[in-house]
Amino acid sequence: MNHPMLLPRPTSVRRGDGSFLLDDSTALVAAPEVRPEARWLQSALRPATGLDLPLADRADRAVELRLDDGLGPEAYRLDATPQGVVVTGGDRAGVFHGCQSLLQLLPAAVFRRAEVSGVPWAVPEVAVTDAPRFAWRGTMLDVARHFMPKHDVLRFLDLMAMHRLNTLHLHLTDDQGWRVQILRYPRLTEVGAGRSESQRGATADAPGDGRPHGGFYTQDDIREIVAYAARRHITVVPEIDVPGHSQAAIAAYPELGVGGGPSEVWTRWGVNPHVLNTEESTVAFYRGVLDEIMDLFPGPVVGVGGDECPTIEWREDPRTQRLMRERGLRHEHELRSWFVRQLGAHVAARGRRLFGWDELLEDEVPPGTVVASWRGMTGAVTAARRGLHVVSCPDDQVYLDYRQSDGPDEPIPVSIPITVEKAYAFDPVPAGLTPEEGAHVLGGQANIWTEHMDSPRTVDYFAFPRLCAVAEALWSTGERRYEEFRPRLEHHLAHLDAYGVEYRPVTGPHLW
Ligand code: TNX
């Protein structure tokens, strides 16, 4: 290896001829502020190397972790010489990212979970400087359509951290399931977290998978997920989707629906005509839900969805029409925004920012709202020009539920093909914005919708290696060339192999 194959690509790398060997004479030296990062590195190195690097105040042969506030947020320097390794971070997150790079510089077997003998744990002599291009480097996981057990969410967080991704957007509720315990409304999970095998009414447009399915996170599970993420410098952004995509909640509490509402959690995919009513009592209900959500998720941003909200039920309901007149609203889409604004005010009152899909731009949105642009990049342009912060996640580039090729052997051929190369070309800043407008783009995220992913194994296959490409698009500065990325990706896949990720092979036969 004459060039250290880091992924995502760092700002600069200088390679020397020597190397530093990690062995049982090596210690970990860390400033008190970065002890948690040192302990993380210690436990990350232990299983495969069998080394239990002691924490020390000083040592002759050391991996040393330091802070230097001259470096920017999340930035780091990694200097490995035959005498030792020094990771210097602009902040704790920077130190953590530097530790991730250190792991990647070691033989790929370091990602195995049991001791590997006969491997010299050599770090090549390098000087790496690095800093992220964007502050929001995300993945959205839809745990509503198919539940992802806590254990697998924790594993997914480790994989995100390996790729310097720092934001996990959890899509916690949808028509097909409510996945987070809310103490004051127990039926949300007692009823809303499970669906029957019913295939009644399935159509070509709205098929289902005909299987019973269920699962939810207790509040203790959520606290564990949030803490595990925080230790890896990942913020978890919750999303409670309203006022569409809410059939699971309506099944649990029919008074939330229009005219009695449907009585079952939906068993099909697609867009559902059933929506929440907009009574004051429904707004109050969701304020209560968001209160518990904000207690559980300390991050600055709280998602309320706002996407794909059909208005037919509101149009046909005399009571809703009266509420609209009383509120001075003429169109049903104004009612959707009204509803979102009520929740926005509640979120803002607790010092948090509202996060929602680009449908919110069809009307007035509370200042400070963060908009996820999913219908291509149009939403990103509109939001940035309106001075709103943007997270880009255009469906034609970073929807990881879409098929990975246009070949005949696609196991689950959803939508248009998004190849690794196409995902790699993703630029979160849309063309045509002025630099000031462009500065409103916080970053981007890959969205993993799980209608067709009923196991963590399937999520691996759809997420990787495209998520590696998206991670680099979000982290690395400077020109990106796929031909330069490809060999680094192949080197990186050995890490995923060692870790046990069932990614889609980039060459050779696809076994699925
Ligand atoms: C659109 S993106 C949706 C999801 C689906 C996804 C399938 C968005 C805000 N809504 O409800 O799962 O397409 O690709």
Image (cartoon, rainbow, N blue to C red):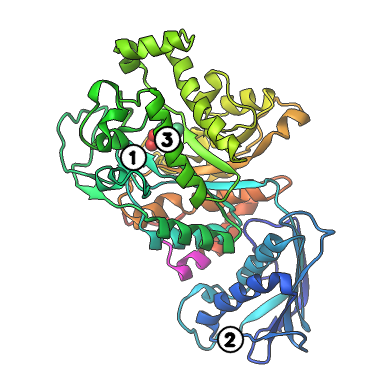
Q: Are marks 3 and 2 in contact (CB under 8 Å)?
A: no
Residue drawn at x 68%, y 77% is 123
Residue drawn at x 39%, y 63% is 151
- The residue range painted magenta reads 494-501
Residue drawn at x 67%, y 47% is 135
Residue at image mark 3: 286
Residue reaching furthest to the right: 70
**In the displayed structure, would residue 300 be above or below residue 52?**
above
Mark 2, Cα crowd under 10 Å, few <14 / some 14-19 / many 20+, is some
189 left or right of 344 in image: left
Viewer-nearest of labels 1 and 3?
3
Q: What secondary structure prevails in the magenta region?
A: helix
**In the displayed structure, would residue 458 be above or below residue 437?**
below
Residue at image mark 1: 413
240 left or right of 472 in image: left
Viewer-nearest of labels 3 and 2?
3
Residue drawn at x 33%, y 52% is 216
In x, y percent, where is residue 496?
49, 64
Residue placed most toward the observer, 411 or 26: 26
Q: Secondary structure at mark 3?
A: helix
Disc 3 and disc 2: Cα gap in Å? 48 Å
Q: Give whichever of discs 3 and 2 has the lower sequence position.
A: 2
Q: Secondary structure at mark 1?
A: loop
Label 3 CB less than 8 angstroms from ligand 1: no
Q: Secondary structure at mark 2?
A: loop
In x, y percent, where is residue 270?
31, 30
Disc 1 and disc 3: Cα gap in Å? 36 Å
Q: Are marks 1 and 3 in contact (CB under 8 Å)?
A: no
Q: Amino acid at mark 1?
A: Pro
Task: Let me know if residue 295 appears in the view.
Answer: yes
